[in-house]
Image (spheres, grey):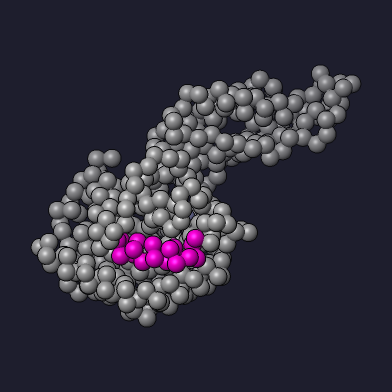
Amino acid sequence: MTEKLEALKAEIRDELDGLSDDLIKLSRRIFDNPELKYEETRAAAWLTEKLEEQDFAVERGVGGLDTAFLARCPHGGDGPTVAFLSEYDALPGLGHACGHNLIATIGLGAGLGLCSVMDRVGGQVLVVGTPAEEGGGGKIELIDAGVFDEVDIAMMVHPSDRTLVGRGSLGVQELNFDFSGEAAHASSQPEEGINALDAVIATFNNANALREHTKESSRIHGIITNGGKKPNIVPEQASACFYVRAAELSDLEKLVEKVKNCASAGALATGAELEITEEDHAYKPMEPNPVLADLVEENFEALGEEVEDYEGGMGSTDMGDISQEIPAVHPYIRITEEDTPAHSEAFARASNSDRGYSAMLTAAKALAMAGIDVLGNEENYRQIMESFQEE
Ligand SMILES: [Zn+2]
Ligand SMILES: [Zn+2]
């Protein structure tokens, strides 16, 4: 069996080498035409055109999102369904400084590569276009609309300054605290006022005390969005916005409650009224499936890509929400020098560099090859499902 799978993987590599000029051209085109979340009409159109050209059956606007799509490989049979995810939204002012132009063609390439041998493998292969990762939570909308109901396993790769496979991401919840007090002359009648800004400041002080007693990876960071109008008016309205993050869903839920209590205590202490609004699109923590991660790592290494062990700070992504529903991985591939942060101009340059495009091809190959390990080997699939259920 191994020999047969290795031969299929070699075929996939050849197929992707043959498609490399097209993939690079398309990735560069998306880079040159950055589109913000939920406005990615051109990127979605170009990706789906390419998929149709390769005989994929494409549904546009899935899940009620204009710039989402679901594309099915025409070959396959009974067995699990593997989806490769493409992101293609850019950042305001910075263009593709998160390298989603590369993610777009990694997902596309992985789908085309694996599909090219699906006449000899059971299962189904999909490419799913997922808009608005940068703060829009497109994948959450697609989950809620049932788009992932037919998917057993989801994979994507994000560019980075390191190649990391089993790394997760933090769940994040945005909390808005609006305090209402009582205006008064701050000097002649301060005793008549209720100071909403004091409630905000108390919230920050309480959160700072809480910080000492959270897990190492948890994060609490806030800003004051309204601090009053003039020093001689006791602030009647004041507001703060916090992001609360944690590596596990249960920790995130507990920490969110504690941070809300910090604000409630501020309200109680000052006599201000508190209104709490939770952002709809909180991202859940990314918990990579360990068996699937090992398979991707083996294929990265077979392609000569060195995988690092690294425990550093983490961000958040809506791929986390996918990983809470089905086994998923979100590895990173290095496209630039170490310590080049994403969302920077240097990272944008790397996302449109020879090194970036070469990493894009490696990642597409690795995902398609891991797809062979999943669809061509029942034991791998069984272990992936077993480890998912254990979590
Ligand atoms: Zn980003
Ligand atoms: Zn990103």
Give the residues in magenta: 350-367
Magenta stretch encompasses residue 179: no
User: In the rendered view, does 289 fall on the left or right side of 245?
Assistant: left
Q: Residue at x 47, y 45 (%)?
A: 315
Eyeballing the image, is 358 above or below 183?
below
Q: Residue at x 49, y 60 (%)?
A: 350
Q: Position of residue 331 (x, y in %)?
A: 36, 52
Q: Which sits in the foreground, 355 or 135?
A: 355
Direction right: furthest residue: 188
Q: Which sits in the foreground, 214 or 261?
A: 214
Q: Position of residue 98 (x, y in %)?
A: 50, 56
Quarter containing the C terminus: top left
Direction left: furthest residue: 1
Whether residue 199 is visible to the viewer of this picture, yes or no, is yes
User: In the rendered view, does 196 fall on the left or right side of 143?
Assistant: right
Whether residue 132 is visible to the viewer of this picture, yes or no, is no
Q: Position of residue 248 (x, y in %)?
A: 39, 37
Eyeballing the image, is 213 above or below 39?
above
Q: Residue at x 48, y 38 (%)?
A: 245
Magenta stretch encompasses residue 364: yes
Q: Position of residue 202 (x, y in %)?
A: 65, 24
**Main structural element of the magenta stretch: helix, strand or loop?**
helix
State the count of labels.
Answer: 0
User: In the rendered view, does 371 fall on the left or right side of 234?
Assistant: left
Eyeballing the image, is 343 above or below 45?
above
Direction bottom: furthest residue: 53
Quarter containing the N terminus: bottom left
The quadrant holding residue 234 is top right
